[in-house]
Image: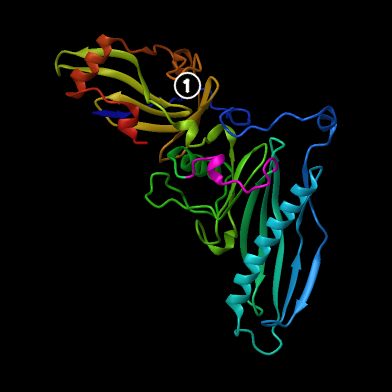
Amino acid sequence: MFASSALVFATLALAPPAIAAPPAARPQATAPASVAAARAKSPGIAVGAKKTTRTNKPNKSIQTVKLPVLHYSSAKNRKNVAKYANEAVAAELKSFNAGRRGTCRGDATAAFDAWPGRTGIYMGRYASVTMSYSLRQCGAAATSKARSFTVDLKTGKKVSMSAFVSLNDITTKMAVANNFRAAKNTCIRQLDPAASKFPQPVAWDVSTKGIRFHYGKRSIGPAACGIPVVLLPWSEVGTAKEMQGAVKNRTYVNNLTFDKEYDTYWGSVIMTSVQGRKVTVFDSLLNSDGVCLHGVRSGKSAMLSQAGGNNTKFKAGMKDTSANPRFDTDRLGQGWREATASDIKKIKHTVGGSMFTARQACGS
């Protein structure tokens, strides 16, 4: 068996990497079509003027709405953003009215407030908006909600989340849990990336910093938490397409020594599995359990997170950017080296069976 190594990549550089845009595999912005376009200002999103409506149908309510306004883009794109924003408001207003129909008595007045809570432009091509809502029905406490949309300014169409991130992949779940923890948001409960039912965001938006998830009220904490929001840097998430292909495995060892009395070997072992940008690491001592880490790589570095426990982030270095990269053993610590065929035989002798991989030990 393997056991939890005291190392757990502790010798790696612990500072998180600079937030960077995702690699070329993610949708790319096109080059300007002309010199004039190149000199044009980049698209931006502002908050429009407030519009207040008072109505008695189906019950008394005051409806206050602010819409996002796209600047420095084509008339078609500006129209599309306004259209999608109005659709989002109409959908939430329909739900609001249905929820209070026939429930307000006398002169009780409900309130509906809508505004762009988060906006972003990504790669000069994707206009992203999360509409925030505060709903107060018949004098009751306000309820917070959110709806979002992202528009491809090249096609004018909405873009799905899958174009930017693989929502249900373990790497994304680890990023959610770790970034909530890094933000020291004590209001929400501890999230378990390995849980069969991991919370799903109700809205999302993208920007140069990363993808931001918005969770429903009470979904991961008490009502007092409102709508929990977490930002996932691009360096910590990937799309399903970026994490496809053959799984490549390597093994690294440190201080393998033979114990004649027990006919076994002692030492430390690190196994790595790489699939596209996806990286899985099993860090262990021989004859005991191990620790699993999951993450994605960008260039010659990978941001990894420990599954369970403290959900700590670790930055690992690699010597190359190939499909089967070699980890930088100098950054692992003194004495680490890639395992030889002889080392693999020693490990097999100790575990009493065939060799396995990090993905087999940790899952996908």
Q: Residue at x 82, y 32 (%)?
A: 37
Q: List x then y, in percent, for residue 5.
A: 35, 27
In this rendering, the answer to whether 294 lies above or below 301 is: below
Q: Label 1: how many residues lie within 10 Å, few (<14), some (14-19) or many (20+)?
A: some
Q: Is residue 232 left or right of residue 249?
A: right
Q: Is residue 25 left or right of residue 69?
A: left
Q: Residue at x 50, y 14 (%)?
A: 320
Q: List x then y, in percent, for residue 338.
A: 37, 12
In this rendering, the answer to whether 342 lies above or below 226 is: above
Q: Residue at x 17, y 23 (%)?
A: 352
Question: Is 213 within the magenta?
Answer: no
Q: Predominant secondary structure in magenta?
A: loop
Residue that numbered label 1 is attached to: 11
Q: List x then y, in percent, for residue 271.
A: 35, 23
Magenta residues span 153-167
Report the quarter where the C terminus lies: top left
Amino acid identity at mark 1: Thr
* Residue 359 visible here: yes
Q: Residue at x 41, y 25 (%)?
A: 274
